[in-house]
Amino acid sequence: MPGRLGGPNPWTGFGPSAVTIPRHGVLEGVRRGSAFVGLFAALIPAFRAGRMNVLNAIATE
């Protein structure tokens, strides 16, 4: 496809068809990161509750 001035189009190799995002790697990283954060968010209060005295834990709630 010629450019506006009749010469070759300099943007021929660019665009959504040529420039792609490695979606599989990005999604896998997001999935693993969210699993780690979720596991961390669940385990920290569990360890804290496991170390507390039962009556003190009830009193703080």
Image (cartoon, rainbow, N blue to C red):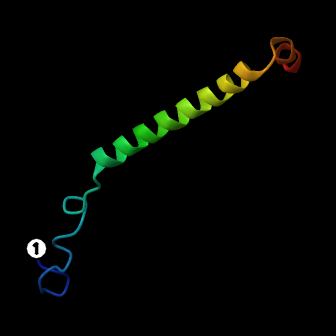
Indicate the secondary structure of the residue bearing disc 1.
loop
Q: Is residue 26 left or right of residue 52?
A: left
- Count of numbered circles on the image: 1
Q: Residue at x 74, y 22 (%)?
A: 51
Residue 18: x and y in percent read 19, 63
Q: Is residue 17 above or below residue 41?
A: below
Q: Is residue 8 left or right of residue 52?
A: left
Q: Neighbour class for label 1 at 10 Å: few (<14), some, many (≥20)?
A: few
Residue 42: x and y in percent read 60, 27
Q: Is residue 16 above or below residue 56?
A: below
Give the quarter of the image for residue 17: bottom left
Name, please, the residue furthest toward the right. 59
In front of the other: 6 or 44? 44
Q: Residue at x 54, y 32 (%)?
A: 38
Quarter of the N terminus within the rendering: bottom left
Residue 33: x and y in percent read 46, 41
In front of the other: 57 or 29? 57
- Residue at the disc numbered 1: 1
In front of the other: 46 or 35? 46
Q: Is residue 21 left or right of residue 12?
A: right
Q: Is residue 21 above or below residue 3?
A: above
Quarter of the C terminus within the rendering: top right
Give the quarter of the image for residue 41: top right
Give the quarter of the image for residue 8: bottom left
Q: Residue at x 22, y 69 (%)?
A: 14
Query: Which residue type does callout 1 highlight?
Result: Met
Q: Residue at x 16, y 72 (%)?
A: 12
In front of the other: 6 or 10? 10
